[in-house]
Image: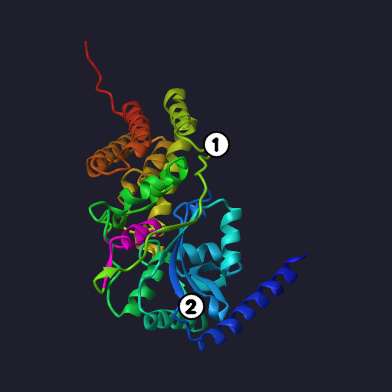
Amino acid sequence: MNIYQLKKIFLCILLLSSICNSFSQNTLLSKNARISILTCGTGNESYSLFGHTAIRVSDLENNLDVVYNYGAFDFDTPNFVMQFTKGNLNYFIVNNRYIDFMNQYNYEKRSVYEQELNIPLALKQKLFENLAQSLLSEERLYQYKFIDNNCTSKVVDVINKTLNAKVIVKKTDTDQTYRSILYPYFDNHFYEKLGTSIVFGTKVDQMGTKIFLPFELQKSLKLIQYQNHPLCQENKTLIAFEEETPTSWWNNCYTYLVLLGFVIFINKKSIDFIYLTIIALLGLLFVFLGFYSSHQELGYNYNILLFNPVLFMVLYFWSTRNPKWTYRFSVLNILMMIVYFFFIITKIHLLIVSPILITNLIVLARLAIKHKKRIPIII
């Protein structure tokens, strides 16, 4: 089956889904209808590290059992990577048959939990209609934001809209920063943890007062009251799998330390030059992302004090054999890294970036010492 045929099948599925939902707008839910929040477990792929949130609408009398989720996007979007980086990539709501949805998570060996909403039938009907409207109108599209606009926050928004009040609010972990909340999700995914530690800026150091992760929503729903009773019934496990701990010969702290140790102990000009070039290029990337991207998490990134584009000046004067300015810019970078150290000393990612900080200091210190003007001694 070629790509063209696959696209035709995909379009047919979307068309059938739209037809189905055009009828669902006129469907009156029975008194036995159930609407629930589905919280899907984490996986080992980068897209599944945080889990997923969806809404299930079940009404046996209307032969209805569908799942709505806001996590879909089109890989065929022109300039997909740049659109995602910019923050202009359109995500959209889709619906699937409940059995198909569950089969997918069963195949991926990811647990699924259910919390049924304890709301009157009239509000169930209103929520159902809001979901159908979102699916068939311009509301189906939204621009993904890591904290402010994702599959979980959209579920919170549509339920609060239905209840005509900000009923669902965060009840746990409000005394932690977003960075601290995210950190455990990267356990056993070392370079993903390192990457997010250095690419995220000051926004993720704010207190995590918004619900933005599936299991945050699940925990908050257990504690929320609505009209003098719990908003949700007891959490129910639909499918459960033991979490598999991923193993990798390269994605771990040992390769990280070996590579940096190699730079420190080999002590060769070519190795130091390549290393500083990589660090400077990463800094240039962070500056670019800060200005180019509308993802607020990437802005005001103080990690550029460590991955500093000013290193290009060191490299330039070093390569042109100018000892005076090589020394001065080396010292300047060392001073900025000392400032960086005191800035992150209380932050959770201090430990993971410390080896890079130490390597930078050693490489620049020996470069400064080598190019420092020596005072002649007259005997």
Residue 224 horizontal/vertical position (percent): 28, 65
In front of the other: 5 or 196: 5
Furthest-top residue in this view: 379
Q: Residue at x 47, y 27 (%)?
A: 262
Q: Give the SS element for disc 2.
A: helix
Furthest-bottom residue in this view: 26
Q: Which of marks 2 and 1 precedes in the sequence?
A: 2
Residue 115 horizontal/vertical position (percent): 41, 63
Amino acid at dot 2? Arg
Q: Bounds of the magenta span? A: 209-226
Residue annotated with mark 2: 140
Residue annotated with mark 1: 248
In front of the other: 242 or 322: 242
Horizontal side, residue 148 vs residue 141: left or right:
left
Residue 282 horizontal/vertical position (percent): 43, 48
Q: Give the SS element for disc 1.
A: loop
Q: Is residue 220 rendered magenta in the image?
A: yes
Answer with the quarter of the image where residue 351 lies: top left
Horizontal side, residue 338 vs residue 22: left or right:
left
Q: Which residue is drawn at 46% across and 78% down?
A: 131
Residue 44 horizontal/vertical position (percent): 52, 47
Q: Can residue 288 be seen in this view?
A: yes
Answer with the quarter of the image where residue 158 lies: bottom left
Question: Which disc number belongs to residue 63?
Answer: none
Above-or-below relation of 319 to 12: above
Answer with the quarter of the image where residue 101 lies: bottom right
Horizontal side, residue 29 vs residue 378: left or right:
right
